[in-house]
Image: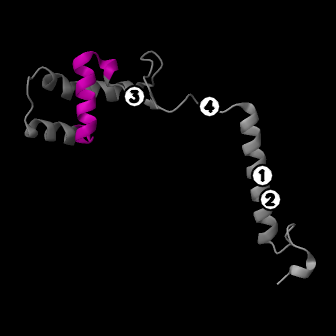
Amino acid sequence: MSRKRDKLMVDDAVWLDALSREKVIRPLAILPRLSPLHVGAACRELKISRSRFYVLLSRYRVSPVTSSLLADSSGPPKGKTLLSPEIEEIIQTGVVARITRRLILGFGFQSPDRGFDDAA
């Protein structure tokens, strides 16, 4: 999942990165066709893959503004969960139980699943 960044909320470094991308992409965006030489040079200068270059170029052609070249923020906002609180609690309980069991078995304590007679 990819989210568009708010141009008013980005760090200066992210904005400067978008500006440097625009310097390279703007002259290429007005060309009707790009040669492999142009694309390769732009990719090397921006240090991005060809596929990423074409994504940025397409976005810039649709909306020729610097903010269209901002890096996407991936995933949901920090701290947001996509699961219900009940499911989160079930998962948390299972994880804690699994870790506890591994710790108990790792230290040589008797498994709660086996009796003392089953010990090897």
Which residue, given by chain and number where applicable, does mark 2 sit on?
Answer: 100
Give the residue pinned by disc 4.
Answer: 82
Q: Which residue occupies the extreme bottom position in the image?
A: 120
Residue at image location 87% in from the left, 80% down from the top: 118
Q: In this view, which residue lies farthest toward the right?
A: 116
The nearer-to-camera label among 1 and 3 is: 1
**Residue 116 — which label?**
none
Pointer 3 local density, CA inside 10 Å: few below 14, some 14–19, many at least 20: few
Q: Nearer the viewer, residue 81 or 77?
A: 81
Q: Position of residue 61 (x, y in %)?
A: 21, 19
Figure disc tally = 4
| Residue 3 falls left or right of residue 53 | right
Q: Which circle's residue, 2 or 4, is located before the other in the chain?
A: 4
Q: Could you tell me which secondary element the residue under label 1 belongs to?
A: helix
Res 51 → quadrant: top left
In three-dimensional space, the C-alpha distance between marks 1 and 3, rounded to whole angstroms, equals: 39 Å
Q: Are marks 1 and 2 in contact (CB under 8 Å)?
A: yes
In depth, the one of 99 and 113 nearer the eye is: 113
Residue 96: assigned label = 1
Left or right, residue 108 beside residue 10: right
Indicate the position of residue 116 as horizontal and vertical percent values. Answer: 92, 78
| Three-letter code for the amino acid on which mark 1 is drawn | Val
Spatial CA span between label 2 and label 4: 26 Å
Left or right of 21 in this view: 84: right
Q: Amino acid at mark 3?
A: Val
Residue 24, position as x, y percentages in the image: 19, 29
In primary-sequence order, the first of circles 2 and 3 is 3
What separation in Å lies between label 1 and label 2 (alpha carbons)?
Answer: 6 Å
Q: Secondary structure at mark 4?
A: loop
Give the CA distance from mark 3 to mark 4.
27 Å
Q: Residue at x 48, y 19 (%)?
A: 9
Magenta highlight range: 46-68
